[in-house]
Image (cartoon, rainbow, N blue to C red):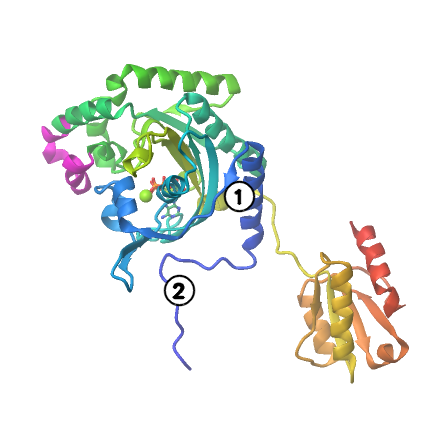
Amino acid sequence: MAQVIQAIRGMHDILPRDIPYWRRLEEVFRRVAQSYGYEEIRLPLVEKTELFVRTIGEVTDIVEKEMYTFEDLNGERLSLRPEGTAGCVRAGIENGLLHNQVQRLWYGGPMFRHERPQKGRYRQFHQLGVEAFGMAGPDIEAELILFTARLWRELGIEGLELQLNSLGSLAARQAYRERLVAYFSAREAQLDEDSRRRLHSNPLRILDSKNPAMQSLIAGAPRLSDWLDEDSATHFAELRALLDAAGVAYVINERLVRGLDYYEKTVFEWVSDRLGAQATVCAGGRYDRLVEQLGGRPTPAAGFALGMERLLALLREGGREMTPASPLVYLVMAGAGTATAGLCLAERLRDAMPALGVRVNCGGGSFKSQMKKADRSGASIALILGEEELAEGVVSIKFLREDRPQQRIAQDAVVAWMRRWTGHEA
Ligand code: ATP
Ligand code: MG
C-alpha cells in the first residue's frame, strides 16, 4: 500500500460532524454584524511580506518567528496572512474606502502562524475580525465591545471576562518604555531568557510573561497608568463610563499590552478560565496610526479579532449537542429500469422542494444492503422503487424512525405527499 500523506502539523480538517458548530458561530456572527451595520469584506490569504513587517512590527513574535514566508515564482517575498487587520487596511487604502469616510467592516477565514501546536493554538486557525475606520472617540470602542458582548449572549457563552487597558499615546508609551527598560536592566540577572531577549526590542511584552518566576519582578515594575498622557486618560475614562452605562462589566488589567505593535490607547481582551493557557478568545484595540503607516491619509481606527477554535471549544463544552443535517429521504431502487426512473423521480422532487434533502442510492446493491445504508444515512424515510412499483407507477414509503405502516402512493402524488408530510413534521 502507498504511504499515507498526513496533514501538516497544526493544520486541521474540519469534519462534517464539526460543521454544525462552525455554521452556528458564523451565522450568529453574521447576524450580529448586520445588526450593528457592519459590512463584509473578503481579503486574500497571501500578501506581500512587507505588509506584515510594516504593520505588525519587526520585533513582534509573529513577524520574528511565526510567519509562513516564501518566494513565489517571480521572486516576490510573500506571506500567508497571520492576521486580518493588515490586509484589511491595505484593501481599504487601495480601494479608496477610508479617506473622509466612515467604514464598518468585518471578515473571516483562516490565518497562519508557525507556533508550537497545542490545545487552542494551531498553525492554521480561523478568525472573525471587525475593523471600524474614521472614528476617533471612545464611542466606537464601546460599540465594538457591545458587539462582542452581544455575540457571547446570542451564542449562549457565559463566564467570559472583559479585560481593558490603555496603552496611551505613542509618545507616552515611549517615555514609559524607557523607564521600564531602566527598571529591568537594573535587574537583568532576574530576567528569564525570553524577557532578556525582549528587553531592548519589545520591553512591554515582558509584562505579559506567564513565567511564575518573573511575577514578583513584574509586580514591582513602573506602571503604565502612571505615564498615561492626559488625552488618553480622558479617552479611557470616557470609555469606562460608556461601558458602565451600558452595563458591561470589565476589569482593568495593566499588564495587557497585546502582541502587536500597532495598538495605542485602548486595548481589550475577552478571557475564559475554562481554556487553560490559551485563555483569550477575542482581542482588539485602537490603532490610529496604522493607515498612515501604510501610505494612507491619517485615519483613526479600532477593531478586534476572535479566535474561532477557542470559542468553539467553549460552545461545545457548554452547549447542546449539534448534529450534521441528515437527508430526509433516502431513495432505494432495486430491479431493472428502476435506477433511471429513480434518478428522474429524485430530480422532480428537488425541483419542487429544493430544501428537502434527497440522497439517492448510487452503486446498486441488494434491497437489504440498500435499506441498511438508508438507515445509516440518518434519513427519516426511505422511498422504495422496485420493479413492481415501477410497473404500477407507484412508490413505497417506509418510515425509518417511527413505528408507522409502510405506504404506497402514486409517483405523481409524491411531491404533494412530501409537502404534507414535511408540514406535519415541522
Ligand atoms: P495569544 O496570546 O494566545 O498568542 P495573540 O495575541 O497572538 O494570542 P491575536 O493576534 O490578538 O492573538 O489574535 C486574536 C485571537 O485569535 C486570539 O485571541 C486567539 O483567540 C486567536 N488566536 C491567535 N493565535 C492563535 C493560534 N495560533 N491558534 C488558535 N487561535 C489563535
Ligand atoms: Mg500569539
* Circle 2: element type: loop
> What's the residue at 56%, 38% (across, down)?
155
Marker disc for residue 315: 1
Could you tell me which residue is drawn at 34 percent across and 48 percent down?
Answer: 82
Mark sitting on residue 7 = 2
Total numbered badges shown on the rendered structure: 2
Residue nearest the viewer, comparing 391 with 293: 293
- Residue at the spot x=40%, y=31% of the render? 302
State left or right for residue 124 relative to residue 340.
left
Q: Quick check: 65 left or right of 327?
A: left
> Is residue 352 in the magenta section?
no
Where residue 340 appears, as percent x and y from the top left, is 75, 78
Instruction: Answer with mark 1 or mark 2, whichever residue precedes in sequence.
Output: 2
Q: Is mark 1 on a helix, strand or loop?
A: helix
Q: Are marks 1 and 2 in contact (CB under 8 Å)?
A: no
- Disc 1 residue type? Leu
Q: Does 193 appear in magenta?
A: yes
Q: Where residue 152 sits: x, y (%)?
A: 53, 35
> Compared to 146, does 337 lie above or below?
below
In the picture shown, does residue 339 fall above or below 213?
A: below
Q: Residue at x 74, y 77 (%)?
A: 368
Check disc 2: other Cα within 10 Å, few if <14, some if 14-19, many if 20+. few
Magenta segment boundaries in residue numbering: 183-202
Tag in front: 1 or 2: 2
By secondary structure, the bulk of the magenta-drawn segment is best described as helix
> On screen, 407 above or below 229?
below
Q: Is residue 191 something that shows in the picture? A: no
Q: How far apart are marks 1 and 2 (CA)?
A: 25 Å
